[in-house]
Amino acid sequence: MRGHSIPALPQFTTLMQNNDAPSPEERRFLLDALSAPEMALKAMRMEISQLTARLQALVDEERQLTEKVGPYRAVLSPFRALPDDILREIFLACIPTDTNPLVDPRHAPILLTHISRHTRHIALTTARLWVAIHVSIERCENRIGRQIEAVTEWINRSGICELSLSVHEDVDSSTSPPHNTDELLKILTESSARWKKISYIGSFASLQRVFPPIHESSEYPRLESCSIKVTSKPGRKRDPQAVFNSSALVTAPHLSDLSLLTSSSAGNYSAYSVRWDRITHLSLGSSTSAVKLGCASTILRFASQLRSCTLHVKDYEPLPPISFPHLTSISLAIAPDEWWLNTPQARALFAEMYLPSLRCITYDAANGIMPLLGLLCGAEGRIRHLSVANLSGPLQLFESLQYCPRLISLDVHALGPALAPPENKTLQTENTTLQGWFELFQPSLIPLAVGLTERQSPPPRRLCPEVEHLFINDGDKSISVFDIAPLLKVVSNCADRLITGGRLG
């Protein structure tokens, strides 16, 4: 209180305790004693008001100076000092790699043109930013008109670079396609000499315009990857096979990645005029439109250069032994309710394939395991990555893992609860619950509940000793991911220190 004090009144404590009224003499004494502190309080409040006003003035001045300095700091920011070639690399890193960019101002590369005048110039003069585009054909004339302008400008910005296009047409709508759809598709086909990758999903009518007859279009000298998915029935007179065979696709010199999907009535893929001996990546059929196994085998006998293969097959048919010396990855899905899925013939069918380079298998056969066992036997223990779906239960999984001693990564999707008898009867006596089979992969993992004071006895057998990653979907929509290698290292180190008398830090 800056040295101010109130003189003490001897009766003050008694007055406060008894709640008595002060006498006139006591009242005058108290008023005289409070006069100086009251004056001091008024002075303090006035000083506080002055300081508050000064503080507010300083805050306003700071805000004004910050607004004035902001543009200067922006000009001197490190981002503006980056060389143009570094900016180009940053912009290229913004482009998605798993899908083609959308014609949308909220996404790169169009978004990059809205930062500043300088970055807009960099983006518009960097042709590599515009080499990939996703065109979604909607049945609305106003949107198609705007798309025509945007796609034309986009392709012009790509210069002479190779193009990656994905053309997806909305065929679920009941309305007919706009009349200017042909104009949009014509803009795309005019750049076909620069196509490197093309993915088409849509109707048969639009397919004929994307891949016109060879006498109406240029060749595809740079085309490496082609994906065709026809989502409507082509009719009686023509089919996707005829469109493919009459187009310049049959003469594309570098076509090596091919994906074909048509309706079940037009799924004779072996009749496509393709240089199958040049194909390195192949995908045939889908879960809703599987290809007949005999048709697939006709193609596979010639596709000796395959590196990866995705097949959705149906209908059993005996096959001669097929050699895939370069195949590293296969994805096999078999239509449900096929009678031959759990027969010895199914296992022998795939076990006779020559697969010296196979390392990765993705398998879905709706509770049938024999084709998978055949592939694993043909791989002769070389599988490093395995993904399975819709097995009937853990015992089928155990039966498969016996053939994967060098497995590193395992994905399990929709594992059913049924304990179907495996081919190897010795597995029936082991723990086959989802909680118990984890121990079969890493018996050196030590349960924390034991206190890490002594090791448990290992389980009766150890599956996949090199596995490092598990992805498990146990059927009730709960998903768990285990990166075993780091966890095993930490737990083992802790256990060793406890056993040797050390302390955990």
Image: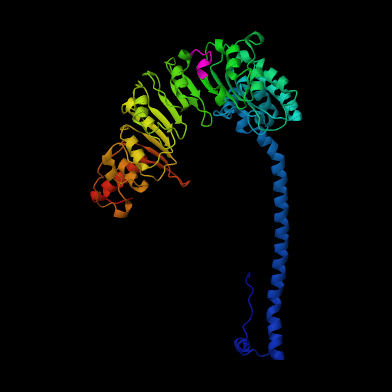
Say above or below: 297 vs 109: above
Depth check: give the residue in front, 430 or 9: 430
**Where is residue 226, by image quadrant?**
top right
From the top left corner, tell me how far across and down residue 392 is, in percent: 40, 41
Hey, which residue is sitting farthest top in the picture? 215
Depth check: give the residue in front, 226 or 239: 239
Depth check: give the residue in front, 41 or 478: 478
Image label count: 0
First to last magenta residue range: 269-275
Is residue 247 in view from this perspective? no
**Where is residue 462, by image quadrant?**
top left
Is residue 346 in view from this perspective? yes
Depth check: give the residue in front, 110 or 70: 110
The residue depicted at 61 percent of the width and 12 percent of the height is 193
From the top left corner, tell me how far across and down residue 7 is, in percent: 63, 81
Magenta region includes residue 271: yes
From the top left corner, tell me how far across and down residue 153 is, in percent: 70, 21
The answer to whether residue 405 is left or right of residue 413 is left
Magenta region includes residue 277: no
**Where is residue 372, by image quadrant?**
top left
Say above or below: 208 vs 413: above
Colouring method of the image: rainbow
Say above or below: 15 vs 313: below
The answer to whether residue 142 is left or right of residue 4 is right
From the top left corner, tell me how far across and down residue 180 is, in percent: 74, 23
The quadrant in which the N terminus is found is bottom right
